[in-house]
Image (cartoon, rainbow, N blue to C red):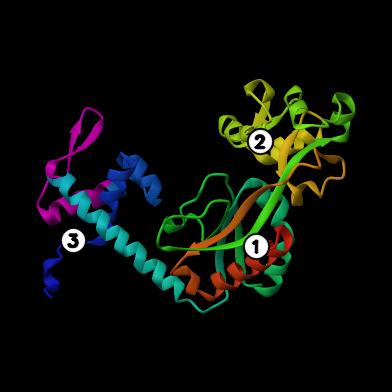
Amino acid sequence: MNWNSVSFDWNQARAFLATVEEGSLSAGARALGVTQPTLGRQVAALEAALDVVLFERVGKSLVLTPSGLELADHVRVMFEAASRVSLTASGQSQAIDGKVRITASDVMSALILPPVMAQLRTRAPLVDFEIVAANDIRDLQSREADIAIRHVRPEQPDLIAKLVADATAHFYGSSSYLDRRGRPAAISEMKAHDFIGFGDNARMLELLNPYGLGLTEENYRLGSESAVVAWEMAKSGLGIIIMSDEVAAMSPEMERVLPQMDPFVFPVWLTAHRELHTSRRIRLVFDLLGEFLKGAMGKG
């Protein structure tokens, strides 16, 4: 192996890649947490070390040269390899301390997870926990989170996924709303009611209408991207909402609509990166979450 064949500094290559991926020196500097002049000097140092021109300035924009475009592909491969090294190293940590980021939907984060945090704090008092409440699927491979709780199984081969529960959901409405608008006795009566949506209403209609509900966009005049906000609207008497039975059980003012209707069943998947799952702290949190969610949300 020719150790003298590498003639540049990795930090310079990282500065170059950040500029490419973020689109400008200023954006790249923000992403790396450095000043723009510092980033500019690192990119210039890489150009000097390699004796190539990586960017051309066109107006106020930086444009990759052919050499820069080719080099960017190689540096991306280097970055992915460096990321795998970091993941492997953190996975080998046997200390039950450090930080663990858990990402879950806003409903799960706000209403289901808090009770388990007391157990986790007792079992791992030196671990710092961060709950990332997000309804989009966070990328575990880029370390936006260490553990994810989701309702779809991840497809990436580097991720470990465990089905911990098959949870159930029904339609719910507040007693005040149902007293005012009436309690539907059959599925055909549902289309006369107001519904509260969260997320994509069109997708919600695709999932619900095969059950014979006959709902349209007209039924969904109120909603929010946040399921927590939508749930609070329903609790305030503004309409009917679909919600997990575990969450609904916490609110006695909410009544199950069409109690004779079969439940909607949805999976609860617990996911971690394959290498991170060898870390004692990640494994401890992963296993405790699995036990808790299995007991709280279904038989799994």
Around disc 1, counting alpha carbons within 10 Å, would you say few (fewer than 14), some (14 to 19), or many (20 or more)?
some
Estimate the x, y position of residue 117 in percent, counting from the top left.
70, 63
Around disc 2, counting alpha carbons within 10 Å, would you say few (fewer than 14), some (14 to 19), or many (20 or more)?
few
| Helix, strand or loop status at disc 3 | loop
Q: Which residue is mark 1?
A: 300
Q: Which residue is mark 3?
A: 8
Q: Is residue 46 magenta?
A: yes
Q: What amino acid is labelled 2 in the image?
A: Tyr
**Residue range of the region highlighted in magenta in the rendering:** 40-66
Q: Quadrant of residue 36?
A: top left
Q: Quadrant of residue 295?
A: bottom right
Q: What amino acid is labelled 3 in the image?
A: Phe
Q: Residue furthest top?
A: 218
Q: Which residue is mark 2?
A: 211
| Helix, strand or loop status at disc 1 | loop
- Between residues 54 and 195, which one lies in front from this camera angle? 195
Q: Earlier in the sequence, mark 1 or mark 2?
A: 2
